[in-house]
Image (cartoon, coloured by chain):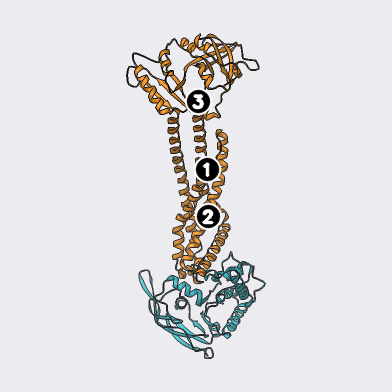
Amino acid sequence: MADEVFFSMRDIDKDYIMGGEAVHVLKKITLSIEEGEYLSVLGPSGSGKSTLMNIIGCLDTPTAGQYILRGREVEDMDETELARLRSREIGFIFQNSQLLPRLTALKNVELPLIYAGVSPRERRRRAEAMLERVGLEDRMDHLPTQLSGGQQQRVAVARALVGNPALLLADEPTGALDQKTGAQIMALFQELSDEGRTIIMITHDMNIAARARRIVRIIDGVISEGGSAQDA
Amino acid sequence: MLKKIRSTFVMLRECVVMSLDNIRGNKVRSFLTLLGIMIGVTAVIALITTVSGVSGSISSSFSSMGAGTLTVSVSGSDLKSGMTSEDLAEVSALDSVSGIVPSISLNGRVSYGKTIETNVTVSGKNAYYFIMNEDLVVQGRPLNFIDDENNTYVCVISREMVDTFFFGVNPIGQTLYISGLEFTVVGRYEEDTGGGVAAAFNGSPDIIIPYTTAMKINNSAEVNNFTVYLKEGVDSETAATEIENLMDRQFDYEDDCFTVTSMSSVEDTMQTMMDMMSSLLAGIASIALVVGGIGIMNMMLTTVTERTTEIGLKKALGAIPWQIQIQFLIESFMLSMIGGLLGVLAGLILSAILCNVLGTSFVLNTGAIILGVGFSAAVGIIFGWVPARKASRLNPIDALRAV
C-alpha cells in the first residue's frame, strides 16, 4: 500500500561495554519501513529488541551502520538535534505507560507539547482532543493513580499521538495489561493503522505481534523477516 | 525569532509551575532544605540592620554632644602635672574659643540621713557648662559664676539621685554629704541623652558641683580634663592645632603632655569600626548561607536520582538537555528564593525586636534586603548548577531502564 520509505537501516551494529567486555547486542541489522506500515518486532527478552527500538526512536545511536530517518542521517546528530527529531517524528508508548504521577491525565498528555513550545491554550485544546480520541473525555482531570491500567495506557497513547508524530513506537504496549484491556489497546492500534499512521510495535508475544501486517523476528541481535500476519 | 522567544517563555513558565509542584510535593524535605538559606538570610539581615541601627544612634549622639567641641585631656610632665587657672584662661582667650568647661571627677560616698551611696560619680564643672546646656536643669537653678569664684558647697543632682535620696521630697534646699562635706542641693537636672547607648558614652555624672570646690576637695590646683567650646563656624581641626600650639608652649614643649580630641574624629573612627564590625558579622552569617547552599545541592542531587525515570521520559518525549537543565536550575533557584524571602521577613522581624530591646531606632536597610535576596538567588543557581547539569546529561535509555 505505502510508497514512500519512512526509514532505512543498513548494517546497524550496536556494542555495549559490559564489565570490560564488548557485547554485540545488534549485528548487521538491515531494515526498512515505508510510510503507513504496521510492523511488529518479535523477539524473546535479551534478543536486542529494546536496543533496536531505542535506535529506531533516536534515543540511542548505533555503533556502526547507517540509519536514515525521513531522509536524514541520524548518526551525526547531537543530543539536541535528536531531541528535536523525537519531538517531531516519534511518539513513544512504554510498557508500563510511564505517566508522571503528580500530573493529571490532561497534563501528562500536554507534556510533549511543552517541550515543542506550543502555547498553553493550543496545548490544552490538542490534549483534550486526543484524550477524547482515546475515549477518556471524562477522565481528563484524574491522576494516573485514579485510572485503571488500560486507561493509563490509553493516556500514554494519547500522549504519544498529541504531537502528531509520523511514527508510533510501542514497547510491549500490552505487557502490563490483562487480556481484555490488552485487546482494547490493540483495537486502538488497528484503528490508528487504518488511518494510515506508521506503527512499530515491539513484543515478545506472538499473538500480539500477529495483529501487525508485517512481522520481523529478532533473535540474538540478528533480524529475520517473519513474513506477514497471515503466514504466522 | 519572536516565536522562539515566545515558546521559550512558555516553557520557562511551565518550569516554574512544575518546580512549585515538586517543592510542594516534598513539603517537609523542601522546608528543611530551605531552612538553611532562611537562617542564613535572617542572620545577615538581622545583624546588618541591628548594627547599623546601633551605629546610627551612637553617631547621632556623638554629633549632638560633640558638635563644635574639643576634648582635652592632660597627663602633664614631671614639672607640671596639669593646667592652672591661668593656663585655662589663656586657652579661653583664644579667638576660636567661645569658652571652656573643666571637668574634675571625684568618686565619692554620698549620704543623706540614713541613706548612703558609694561610687557616686561626682563631677566638678563650671557655670559655662550650664550656659552651653541651658535646658539641662529642670528644677531649681544651675551653678553660676559666683559658685565658681567662691567655691561654694552647692550641687546640682540627677533625677536618679533625687529618686535615691529624696524620693517623694522636694530636693531643693536639702543637705547632702559628699565625701563627708555638707552640700546644699540647688537644682535637679534631666539627662538629655536619648538612649542607653549614648548615656554610656556620655558618662553623665550623678552630681555636679563647682569645679573650684572639687579642686579644693582633691587638694589640687590643676585641671586635667576640660572641654573647649568653639565659636560658631570655626573648623575644629584648625582650632585643635591652635590649642595644641598654645599648650605646647605652656608645657615647655615637652612631648606627650596632653591630647586634644575632636568629636568628629572620634565619630569617624567609631563609624569605621562599626562598618568593619558590620561586614565581619555579615561575613560570618554568610557562612550559614553557604551551608544552606550545600543543603540545597544535596537535596537536588537526591531529587535528580529519584526522578531519573521522569527525566528519561521527558527526554524521550522530546525535551532537549537544556530544557531539563533549566527545569532543575529553576527548581533550586525557587527553593533558595523561597528560603531567602522567608529569611528577609524573619530577619526584619528579628531586627525590629533587637532594635527595640537595644533602644535604637529600627531603620529598614534596603541594602541588607537586596544583599539577602541576591545572595540566596546566587546560592540557588550556583549550588543547583551541578545537579541540573547531571540531570541534563542523563542518558534517556539508562534513565528509562531504571524503572
Write down the residue under mark 2.
B335
Q: Which chain is orange?
A: B
The residue shown at (56%, 43%) is B348
Q: Are marks 1 and 2 in contact (CB under 8 Å)?
A: no
Q: Which chain is cyan?
A: A
Question: Mark 2 or mark 3: which comes first in sequence?
Answer: 3
Q: In what element is the residue under mark 2?
A: helix
Q: In what element is the residue under mark 3?
A: helix
Callout 2: chain: B
Q: Looking at the picture, does residue B60 appear above or below residue B42? A: above
Please provide percent x and percent y for residue B241: 38, 25
Q: Looking at the picture, does residue A4 appear above or below residue B92? A: below
Three-letter code for the amino acid on which mark 1 is drawn: Asn
Callout 3: chain: B
Q: Residues within 10 Å of mark 3 (few under 14, many from 20)?
A: some
Residue B365's label in the rendered image is 1
> Along the line of sight, which residue is nearer the eye, B248 or A98?
B248
State how far apart marks 1 and 2 are (Cα): 24 Å
Please provide percent x and percent y for residue B204: 52, 22
Q: Are marks 2 and 3 in contact (CB under 8 Å)?
A: no
Q: Are marks 1 and 3 in contact (CB under 8 Å)?
A: no
Write down the residue under mark 3.
B202
State how far apart marks 1 and 3 are (Cα): 27 Å
